[in-house]
Amino acid sequence: MTVIETPRLVLRPCQESDRDLFYELSSDPVVLEFFPFRRRREDADAVFTIISGLMPEDGFDLLVLALKQSDEPIGFSGLSKPKLEPFLPQNAVEIGWRLSARYWRQGYASEAGAALLRHGFETLELDEIISLTVHNNHRALAVMQRIGMHLDPAGDFDHPDIPATHPQLKRHVLYRLSAVEWRRRQMQAAKG
């Protein structure tokens, strides 16, 4: 089980008590502005039951972001292996996050993202981590840039899982960060 601590957060595996947060983040129209659907309670509960019951590959858990001081869950984050060939390489590892709108603009997504990059490159010894989002999701794009990822315009694609009823959500952009780049930046930061 993966547990990661940052100055303000604990990233931990899902617990039954996180079910309400999962529903909130699966149904809030503000949070889901760039998603083609919202889930009803029974659908969110069914997905949560499946996710929380899976035995994930080590390091690829869906993690809850909980405030360190209060243990209040505020969102989800994690590393995953998307199945989007031929748009992404077969062994691609994606970083992602979703936070309750009450906790936006406080740096939590960037803090969790930076910790997950460290986990991915140091613990899991990944060669590269990617992230993708709808082309005009400026909040997600800002987080990707703050954690050191860079745009790969050649990797942009129309997401095959987005229905034709939502054409404004089809175009996705791809951001990347290699382990070599990440280590170089860590060394530069350490030198001050």
Image (cartoon, grey):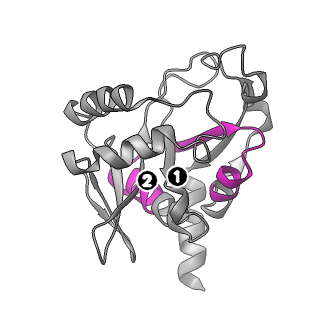
Q: Is residue 170 above or below residue 112?
A: above
Provide the secondary structure element on which disc 1 rests: helix
Q: Which mark is residue 81?
A: none
Q: Which residue is mark 1?
A: 179
Residue 133's image quarter? top right
Tell me residue 16's x, y (percent): 20, 45
Q: Is residue 76 above or below residue 32?
A: below
Tell me residue 119's x, y (percent): 38, 56
Determine whether, in the image, residue 181 is placed left or right of residue 46. Answer: right
Q: Is residue 80 visible?
A: yes
Q: Residues within 10 Å of mark 2 (few under 14, many from 20)?
A: some
Tell me residue 151's x, y (percent): 74, 46
**Disc 1 residue type?**
Ala
Tell me residue 183's x, y (percent): 53, 62
Q: Which mark is residue 121?
A: 2
Q: Is residue 170 above or below residue 145?
A: above
**Disc 2 residue type?**
Phe
Q: Nearer the viewer, residue 9 or 73?
A: 73
Earlier residue among tags 2 and 1: 2
Q: Gap in Å between the C-alphas at discs 2 and 1?
A: 6 Å
Q: Is residue 1 visible?
A: no
Question: Which stretch is magenta?
Answer: 115-143
Determine whether, in the image, residue 169 is placed left or right of residue 58. Answer: right
**Residue found 31% across the figure and 32% down from its top:** 45
Determine whether, in the image, residue 82 is placed left or right of residue 156. Answer: left
Provide the secondary structure element on which disc 2 rests: helix
Indicate whether residue 152 is drawn in magenta. no
Q: Are marks 2 and 1 in contact (CB under 8 Å)?
A: yes
**Residue found 50% across the figure and 22% down from its top:** 90
